[in-house]
Amino acid sequence: MPDTQYIIRPMKAEIIAIGTELLLGDIVNLNAAYLSQQLAGLGIDVFYHSVVGDNPSRINSSIKLALSRADIVITTGGLGPTVDDVTASVIKTYVLNNALTLKNNRGTVPGQFIKLPDNKFLIALPGPPKEMKPMFRKSVVPLLKNISGFKSVIKSRVLKITGLSEPKVNKKAKDLLELKPPVTVGIYAKLGEVDLKITAKAESEARTLKLIAPIEKKIRKRLNDYIFGADEQTLEGVVGEKLLKSKKNMAIAESCTGGLIANRITDVPGSSKYFKTGIIAYSNQAKELLLDVPPGIIERYGAVSKQVAVKMAQGARRIFNADIGISVTGIAGPTGATKNKPLGLVFIALSKNNKTICKEFRFPGDRVTVKWQASQAALDMLRTSLRG
Amino acid sequence: MPDTQYIIRPMKAEIIAIGTELLLGDIVNLNAAYLSQQLAGLGIDVFYHSVVGDNPSRINSSIKLALSRADIVITTGGLGPTVDDVTASVIKTYVLNNALTLKNNRGTVPGQFIKLPDNKFLIALPGPPKEMKPMFRKSVVPLLKNISGFKSVIKSRVLKITGLSEPKVNKKAKDLLELKPPVTVGIYAKLGEVDLKITAKAESEARTLKLIAPIEKKIRKRLNDYIFGADEQTLEGVVGEKLLKSKKNMAIAESCTGGLIANRITDVPGSSKYFKTGIIAYSNQAKELLLDVPPGIIERYGAVSKQVAVKMAQGARRIFNADIGISVTGIAGPTGATKNKPLGLVFIALSKNNKTICKEFRFPGDRVTVKWQASQAALDMLRTSLRG
């Protein structure tokens, strides 16, 4: 039944980004990705992106080609008043009777929404994302919804996983990754995170949600607590919500992560409610002076050891009178490794209710990569300690 | 004279990225930007980028169109073994006698370098950047250098500026921004940073450097100490070099930046040589307990005040026996503002040689934006305190 309901002809769009700086690789074409996501949400298919420089004849031939293949052609960039910006003069040649000027609330240059013969549309938007995005959302989306019967809707749901490698997630979701439309699952590996994206296409939003729900349920059953959040949620945001909900606060003692964990926690608005203090104890002196780590322990086991991680977490909790103390000590590289303590060795300890746990990790990659993975692992230990 | 030497016909290239995930906006086309930069460095002009989904006939027509306009067509993506990856089968139809298989050291799927009639070339590369980039550098660049007389070279020099707004930099460099080839200057505004990029195109690298040098000299004379670095340098890296060179170390006390400054400083390999300790003192209790800020001062002036910033910087320096103490206190938002203390108000103090300076800033934007700008300003105060 879903299949027969699915016989619709979605409109086709193309996106043309204009600007020599894109062809030089000076900037990345973020606008095309943004517009594609938005158009997908409206059920409009995108078959091509293109990028062309600030050259009137090449801009014109790109627009002509795109109009021959698609119903809707959106250009971004080149509308400004400077000599380089030549799009406006090309766009003008397409304006017959049916053109709307789109107001730019964040800049000086307006956009254009032009109705052409054969039910085709040419939409010219400014290049800077902070001008383009609100213009698209506020002016273009309502117009697009009006011009034609949009019968299909695409919805996605992203489930975010940490603590499991991509091959392991792949294995657990293998059959789901092979699903065919109208509902599909994609896998996206990031540093310290794997995302599973469920996408459904149907004639209404309600129907897409009905297609997504059982797949999400299956994934949640299989991956359970490895899923830290969904869609726009961040790990530090989820940790913050759980701390607020459980009325707990925390203090942190960072060595190799150098402030990254505290920085991520304090990116969340309202984090001052649960984040008490962070100590970045790079030196042994700081570990002893600020966190009460006994000097004998550092001498005996080394600064990068389970024993020191445990004392740091306990010290952070006790000294700052916090509910939870977290500590990280490790070797981010490129120097500092020894025969028994390789680059990427990291100990993370968590002290809570007079109980302290410590985990050992080996993270691959360079300094910044190791720091990030350690911050993911620490935030995830905090998250799982707060469940139930 | 330079103009007559400049009569060369550079080769033209086009880049086609293949993958439905790009058309859905799930990933951004970073490959096109990377390849464009690399090709510019080889003196090869890029007039078009395009993106097409995993559809054989659309891939084929995109390649055909690109070959009609350019000498070199590079595709990325779609070479893998899965059902979605259909590029390989399309590429095969172009292989006559003259094809080289390109080894993939980071993955399983090889690339193709195909010589076509009329001195045209089709190059198929894998999609994952970590496979594509080394293949391009190691296999494609030497081949490209061989196939034809590359007579022109493009070189760029980026001068990085902080502490001046884009309109102000624009005003100071107005005449230079209007320069015409073979040497041009572009301006790029980032958060807390403005870049001026000098680009020269000539028949040899030596000649490009000769074109760039006098323009760089002019910019340096006008913007002087606002320029913190060039090309790949980062502000935290420059600060680190200066600390090493002057044999100084530092401690930091952060409130509203929440660990961001320490995190940036410790991203630099070897920073443990000059970074002693960081304190993230979100609460008044932490400011008093860890940094010896007198309680009376906080009561009288408030935690976000010049007086508290000064005491925090002095405390950080004294308690950790550091050469330099830096502190930041401010209101990053979205809450915490009062009538006299608006969102974005930040005080940064620097204590060195028994002298403490404090600057007041008003940064626009949201929480994360304010944090970043405050970290730029603090690192820049550190940098300028270390000169000469």
Image: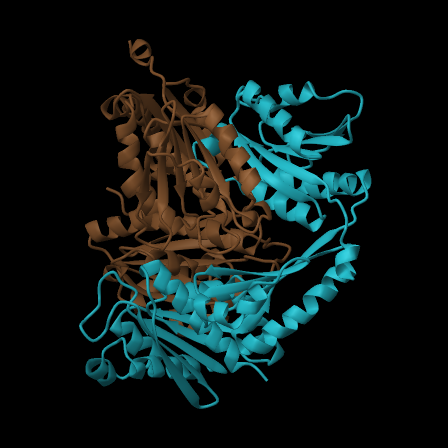
Chain colours: A brown, B cyan
* Residue A336 location (% of width, % of height): 60, 61
Q: Quadrant of the N terminus of chain B?
A: bottom right
- Whether residue B96 is situated above or below residue B243 in the rendered picture: above
Answer whether residue A280 is visible to the viewer in this image.
Answer: no
Residue displayed at 72% across by 41% down = B11
| Front residue of this view, candidates A47 and A278 | A47
| Residue A309 in sight here | yes
Quarter of the rendering containing residue B294: bottom left
Seen in the picture, residue A329 relative to B272 is either above or below; the reply is: above
Q: Quadrant of the C terminus of chain B?
A: bottom right
Is residue B60 found left or right of A185 in the rendered image? right
The answer to which of A34 and A148 lies nearer the viewer is A148
B310 relative position to B27: left or right? left
**Residue at the spot x=31%, y=82% of the render?**
B306
- Work out which residue is located at the far left of the displayed protein and give it: B339
Q: Residue furthest bottom?
A: B354
